[in-house]
Each structure stands twice: as structure tokens, then as C-alpha cells.
Image (spheres, grey):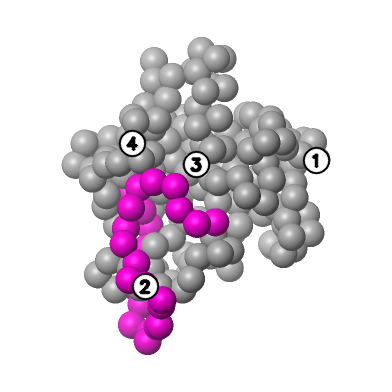
């Protein structure tokens, strides 16, 4: 039976903030907050943390997530989120776990709304869309070196991405839900789901 699986990439190395994914917000480690949000989502069957760090792995297991240990070659500063997702899917397949829908969550978003996540999964599972992104409407005046184009393929790492406007005046966010996960990471019919400002990343 295929499952809806939330995957949370959380590597140990961080140049900007040391041990970032273990930093506490409201007394709870960031990675654990993402785990809790996924566990509270009625549409998620399994929560998986992809990491190269034993301490993060221990925290993830303590909070009830499965763990996929990521090899060093896809855990460095140049590693993409896509590589972590594809590795996690392959590892789950090797464990006999079929993944029909993949929910990609960032540990660095401490206020993920479980209800909105469930809505995104339903949009994808209904086959109305192949991928759903959360977004926050913004009317701020922004300058960017080039126009943002929504795409479902490998992109620049988050800390290197310029501030830019998104489709319909929304800002692309760091959470997404994909159907037929491996086939749809690079292509698909996207949907933007508007979020309230208090659900934005910190």
C-alpha cells in the first residue's frame, strides 16, 4: 500500500547558524516542531527525517519520526534538497515502503500549519494538481535581478536565492507536496496555496 510521507531534510552542517536544526523555538527543537506539524496532519501516514547527523537522528526518533541517514556526498553545503528527497525515497523503497505522495517540509519553518498541510495533500491526492506550494500574499515593493518563474526542478539553495516576487503576488515558500514523488519532482502542474502571515517562516 502506498503512503503519504512527510520528509524533513535536516543536515548537521550549517554555516549561518551552528546546529540550526536543533535550535529551540518555544522550548522545542526546530526539527521536532516540523515533526509535530506533520504528525498532527490527518493526511500524513509517515514522518521521515533525512540527516547526516547522529544527534539530529536521535532527536527525530525521540519525537516519533523515522530516520534516513544521508551520505556525506549529498549532505554538504552544495547539496540540494532534491537530492535528499530522492535519496529518502530510494531508501524507503528499499525498506518496502511505497510513497504515493511526498510532503517536503523544512525544519527551519517553525510554524507549519497542519490544517494547511492537509489541504495541500488533498489538492494533490485529488489529482487536480501534481504539486502544491504554500505561499504568502505580499504587496511589498521588491527588486530582483530577474523575474521569478515557478518551476518544479532543481533550483538555487535557499540562502543563495534572491528576494523575488512570485506568481500572483505571492512569495514561493519552502514547503511543497508532490504526487508520484520521483516522477513529479522535475515537472508537474503546480498549485499555490495562500497562507496567513502568522504561518510564515521565522
Q: Which mark is residue 82?
A: 3
| Residue 3 in view | no
Q: Quadrant location of residue 189?
A: top left
| As drawn, 111 above or below 162 | above
Disc 3 versus disc 1: distance between alpha carbons? 23 Å
Of 119 and 82, nearer the camera is 82
Membership of 152 in magenta stretch: yes
Tell me which numbered mark, 1 or 4, is placed earlier along the sequence.
Answer: 1
Marks 2, 4: nearer the viewer: 2
User: Measured along the vertical axis of the image, is residue 186 above or below residue 181?
Assistant: below
Estimate the spatial distance between the alpha carbons at disc 2 and disc 4, rounded to whole Å: 25 Å
The relative height of residue 124 versus residue 106 in the rendered view (above or below) is above
Give the residue at mark 1.
Answer: 55
Q: Secondary structure at mark 1?
A: helix
In the visual, does 195 lie left or right of 36?
left
Q: Which residues are magenta?
A: 132-157
Seen from the viewer's position, the closer of residues 198 and 82 is: 82
- Residue 199 location in percent, x, y? 47, 65
**Image point 54% across, 38% down: which residue?**
83
Please tell me which of labels 1 and 2 falls first in the chain. Answer: 1
Q: How many marks?
A: 4
- Magenta stretch: dominant secondary structure: loop
Amino acid at each position: 500500500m502506498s503512503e503519504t510521507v512527510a520528509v524533513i531534510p535536516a543536515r548537521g552542517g550549517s554555516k549561518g547558524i551552528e546546529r540550526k536544526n536543533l535550535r529551540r523555538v518555544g522550548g522545542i527543537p526546530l526539527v521536532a516542531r516540523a515533526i509535530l506539524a506533520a504528525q498532527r496532519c490527518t493526511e500524513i501516514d509517515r514522518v521521515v527525517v533525512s540527516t547526516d547527523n547522529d544527534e539530529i537522528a536521535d532527536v527525530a526518533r525521540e519525537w516519533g519520526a523515522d530516520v534516513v541517514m544521508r551520505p556525506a556526498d549529498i549532505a554538504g553545503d552544495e547539496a540540494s534538497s532534491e537530492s535528499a528527497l530522492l535519496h529518502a525515497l530510494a531508501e524507503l523503497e528499499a525498506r518496502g515502503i511505497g510513497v504515493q505522495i511526498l510532503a517536503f517540509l523544512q525544519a527551519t519553518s517553525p510554524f507549519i500549519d497542519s490544517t494547511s498541510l492537509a489541504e495541500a495533500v488533498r489538492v494533490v491526492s485529488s489529482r487536480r494538481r501534481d504539486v502544491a506550494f504554500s505561499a504568502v500574499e505580499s504587496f511589498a515593493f521588491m527588486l530582483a535581478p530577474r523575474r521569478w518563474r515557478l518551476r518544479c526542478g532543481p533550483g538555487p539553495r535557499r540562502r543563495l536565492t534572491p528576494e523575488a516576487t512570485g506568481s500572483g503576488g505571492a512569495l514561493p515558500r519552502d514547503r511543497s507536496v508532490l504526487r508520484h514523488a520521483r516522477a513529479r519532482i522535475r515537472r508537474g502542474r503546480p498549485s499555490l496555496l495562500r497562507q496567513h502571515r502568522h504561518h510564515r517562516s521565522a
